Image (tube, rainbow, N blue to C red):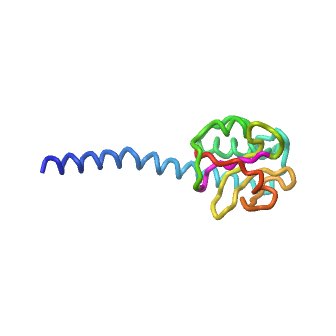
Amino acid sequence: MLKKFMAVLFMTTMMMTLLPSMSEAATYHNSAISVAKANMGKRYTWGGINPRTGFDCSGLVKYSFGKAGKALPRTAGEMWGKGTRVYSLKPGDLVFYKTYKSSRPTHVGIYIGNGKFIHAASSKGVSVSYLSNSYWKPRYVGAKRI
């Protein structure tokens, strides 16, 4: 009987420890996506970090996660060094691409589900693209969960 009680107590403690962090993650990921979506159509600006000046890819991601309460580095290459590598994407994961020769990723977006990600593209500004897009798919490097 004591063993069962201890097992239940242990499981309850573990659940109480894990659940807040799981809901916090879901909350800031959803918030970052909402911030990025609120900036749909903003122009692309190299080095841009806010809605007034426009965004580049990492500027949009940094701004969106910052508004959601998570600080990220400034560039896609630096962001690649953060978080945990994932192979099964969830909304809020960062997706990385190499758009020119470099040892690190040069483009980043936020996965929003259903095979799509939001990013600041030099051709369209803040927009949504499919992971399977003929331009993006061959340039995909991987994803990280922050």
Is residue 90 one of those drawn in magenta? yes
Total numbered labels: 0
Image quarter for residue 17? top left
How far across and down, in percent of the image, does residue 101 sit? 83, 40
135 and 49: which is toward the camera: 135
The residue most toward the right is: 123
Say which residue appears at 23% left-offset and 48% top-offset.
7
Say which residue appears at 74% left-offset and 47% top-offset.
97
Magenta stretch, main secondary structure, is loop
Say which residue appears at 67% left-offset and 39% top-offset.
80
Vertical relation: 71 (above or below) 120: above
Quadrant, the C terminus: top right
How far across and down, in percent of the image, does residue 89 sit? 60, 55
Image quarter for residue 106? top right
The residue most toward the bottom is: 114
How far across and down, in percent of the image, does residue 19 sit? 41, 49
Looking at the image, residue 47 sits to the left or right of residue 79; the answer is right
Is residue 125 one of those drawn in magenta? no
Residue stretch in magenta: 89-98
3 and 138: which is toward the camera: 138
How far across and down, in percent of the image, does residue 14 sit? 34, 46
Say which residue appears at 69% left-offset and 60% top-offset.
116
Looking at the image, residue 23 sits to the left or right of residue 133; the answer is left
Looking at the image, residue 23 sits to the left or right of residue 60; the answer is left
